[in-house]
Image (cartoon, coloured by chain):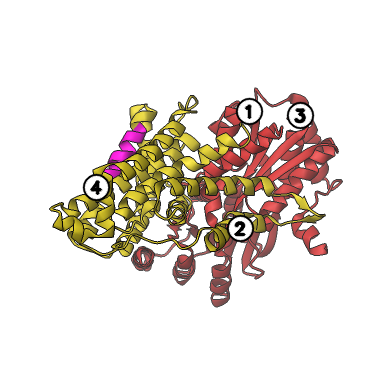
Chain colours: A red, B yellow
Amino acid sequence: MKNKIVQSVWVFGVFTIALLNGGIAYSAVKVGLVLDRGGKDDQSFNSSAYRGLKKAEAELKAEVKTVEAPDDNSFEALQRAFAEKKMDLIIAVGFSQKDAVIKTAKRFPEQKFVLIDADAGLSNVQSAMFEEHEGSFLAGVAAAKHSKTKVIGFIGGMDIPLVKRFLLGYESGAKAVDPSIKVLSNTIGITGEAWANPAKAKELTLAQIQQKADVIYHVSGNSGSGVFDACAQKKVLAIGVDSNQNRLRPGTILTSMMKNIDRVVFDAIKSVQDKKFQGGLVRYGLKSGGVELAFDEHNKPIFDTSAKKLIEEYQAKIIAGKLSVPDYYVTSKRK
Amino acid sequence: MEEWVFPVLRTATPLVFASMGGLWCERSGVIQIGLEGFMLLGAFFGAFFALALKSVFLGFLGAGLIGAILGGVFGIAVIRFRANQIITGTAINLFAAGLTPILCKAVYGSANSSARVDFTEPLLWGPLVAAGLCAVVSWALFLWTPWGLRMRFAGEHPEALQNAGVSVVRYRWMGVVLAGVLASVGGAMLSVFLSSSFVRGMSAGRGFIALAALILGRWNPGLTVMGCFLFAFTDLMQGRLQGHEWFGIKVADPMVHTFPYAVTLFILAFVMGRSRAPKALGEPW
C-alpha cells in the first residue's frame, strides 16, 4: 500500500521531468541511472555507481538523471520512463533489476542499457559482471599471509552462488599461499534481512574467532559492521567488501575487496559518447580494474610489505592469464 | 561459558525485552503485532540518543521514551478509537520501516546506517543484568501484586474488573505504553549493545520472534523467557552447525538455517500442549 503510493509518486515525478525536458534539444549524452533500494547513499554499490555518473557529468558534460527505486516492483516503470524519453544510455544497478531490464530492453530494441552485476543476454544491453573470485583470491592471499593461527574466516550474507563465488576465490587464494590453512565459513540468513543483521553477524564472527580465526572476510552488505565490531573487540583482522571500507576501522580492516562500479559506469558513458558502445556480456576483473584490493593510508600501517609484494605477483599472474582462479559459476555447472 | 552461555544470554537480550513488552500488552487484552516496529524505532533512537548525548545509558532511556510516545500513538488508535489492533500493529511496523531510513538520512546522511557508537566497549554485563531484571520484575509483578492481577483481568475478564470499579482502559493503556517502552529498549540493545550502529531494517524479524516466544510461553513470563532462550540457543546452534558433515553428507546452509523454526514447530506440536490466549485478547473495550 505504502509502496504503491511511493511508487506512483516516483513514476509521476519521472514523467513530469520527461515532459518538462521534452522540448529541448540536447547534444550531450543523456544518461538515466536507475538505482535499487539501497539508494545513492548506501556507501556501497549504488553510491559507487552514482559517483561514476557524477564524474561523467563533470568530465564528459553528460546530461544525467537519477532515480531510486523504492521497491523491486518499480524498476520496469522507471526504466521505461527513461526509455520513452529516448535516453542515450540507461544504467540499471544491481542484479535485482535483471528481469525488468530484459523486459524493457526487448520492448525498446534501439535503446542502449548497462546492467550491473547480472547478465541480461541481450545485444542492446551491456551486462557488466565483476570477477569477484579474482579479487577474493587476492583477499585470500592477504588473509593467509597475515594469519598467525593458520585459521581464517568468511562471513557471507546468504548461501547463494554469488557469495559462493567470493568464498571459492578466497579459499583458493589462501590455499595457494599455504595448503594447510583452514577456512571457516558461515552465512547469516536465508532472506534479504541477512544483509542488514549486524547483531547476528557479530555473534557468528565471535564464534569463528573462538575457533582461532584471526582474519575474517565479510561479504554481507550492511551486516558487515557487526563483523568489524567483533574483530575490533577481539583484536583480529577483518577484510571489507564492495567499496573501500578501510577507513571505517583503521587498524582492524586489513584491506577491502573493491568492485569499482564507478569506473564501469564512467567507461560505459564514455563509450556511448565515443560511439564505441559494446553490448552483451562484459567482464570486469583484475585486468580492467573492475575489482581490486584497497590500499590507502588507513591500512598501510598494518599491511605487511612482503604480503603486498606477493599479492602484486599473484595479480600480475592472473592478469597475464598464467593463473586461473576457480570460478564457482563455472565449477558448479561442471558437476 | 565464553562459548555458549554468554552468546545465548546476549542473543536473548533484545528478545527478552520485546517479549516482556508484548506480555504486558497482550495480557491486558491488546494484540501487539507491532513489536518489530517498536524494536526498529528503538534501534534507531538508541543509537541516536547515545551518539547525541555521548552516553549509552541515555541512549537506552531515550529509546524507551520514544517507545512510550509511539506506544501512546498506538494506544490512541486502538484504545481511544477502538481501531483494529492487528492492522494498527502492522501500521506501526510499516511506519517504523519507512521512518527510520528517512531519519537516518536526515541525521547521518545515509539511509542505510548511522554513525558508529564507538564508546560501548565496556558494555558487557549491564544489558544482561537489565534484561534479567526486566524478566524477574515482570514475573514478580505479574504473580504477586494486585496491579499484575488487575492487568491480567483486563485481558481475561474485563467485565469483572469494571464491576470491581477499576478502569479497564487505564490498565490497557499501561500495557500498551509498557510494550512500546520495553520493545524499544530491546531494539536499542541491537544498535548499541549487540552491534555499534543503526542499520536499516536491523530488527530483522526479532519482534516476531519475541511474539512467537510469547505464544510458545503461553503468555506466562517465566515460560516466555525460556522461549527467548530457546530461540537464542537454536539460533546460535544453527550458526555452529553450518558446514558440518553428518555421515559424510554436507548439509546445505539454507537447510541448517531452518533449524530454529523446525525446533519451534516440534516443541509447539509435541511438547507444549495447547497454548491459550487471554480470553478478551483483541476485543476493544
- Residue plotted at (35% across, 37% down): B137
Give yes or no for contact between labels 4 and 3 (Cβ–Cβ under 8 Å). no
Check chain identity for marks 1 and 3: say if they share one.
yes
Which residues lie in the magenta part?
A: B59-69
Provide residue B41's location: percent of width, then percent of height.
36, 46
Q: Quadrant of the C terminus of chain B?
A: bottom left
Of discs 4 and 3, which sits in the foreground? 4
Give yes or no for contact between labels 4 and 1 (Cβ–Cβ under 8 Å). no
Mark 4, residue position: B174
Magenta span: predominant SS is: helix
Provide residue A77's location: percent of width, then percent of height.
45, 70
The disc, 1 or 3, on the residue closer to the chain's N-terminal end is: 3
Residue count near mark 1 (Cα–Cα under 10 Å), binned few <14, some 14–19, many ≥20: many
Mark 3, residue position: A149
Task: Measure the C-alpha gap from mark 4 to mark 1.
Answer: 52 Å
Mark 1, residue position: A299
Task: Measure the C-alpha gap from mark 1 to mark 3.
Answer: 21 Å
Task: Measure the C-alpha gap from mark 2 to mark 3.
Answer: 32 Å
Instruction: Inspect this view and state whether residue A158 appears.
Output: yes
Of discs 2 and 1, which sits in the foreground? 2
Q: Amino acid at mark 4?
A: Met
Q: Amino acid at mark 2?
A: Thr
Q: Amino acid at mark 3?
A: Thr
Task: Say the numbered circle drawn on residue B258.
Answer: 2
Provide residue A312's location: percent of width, then percent of height.
77, 35
Check chain identity for marks 4 and 1: say if they share one.
no
Give yes or no for contact between labels 2 and 1 (Cβ–Cβ under 8 Å). no
Task: Measure the C-alpha gap from mark 2 to mark 1.
Answer: 38 Å
Check chain identity for marks 2 and 1: say if they share one.
no
Q: Amino acid at mark 1?
A: Asn
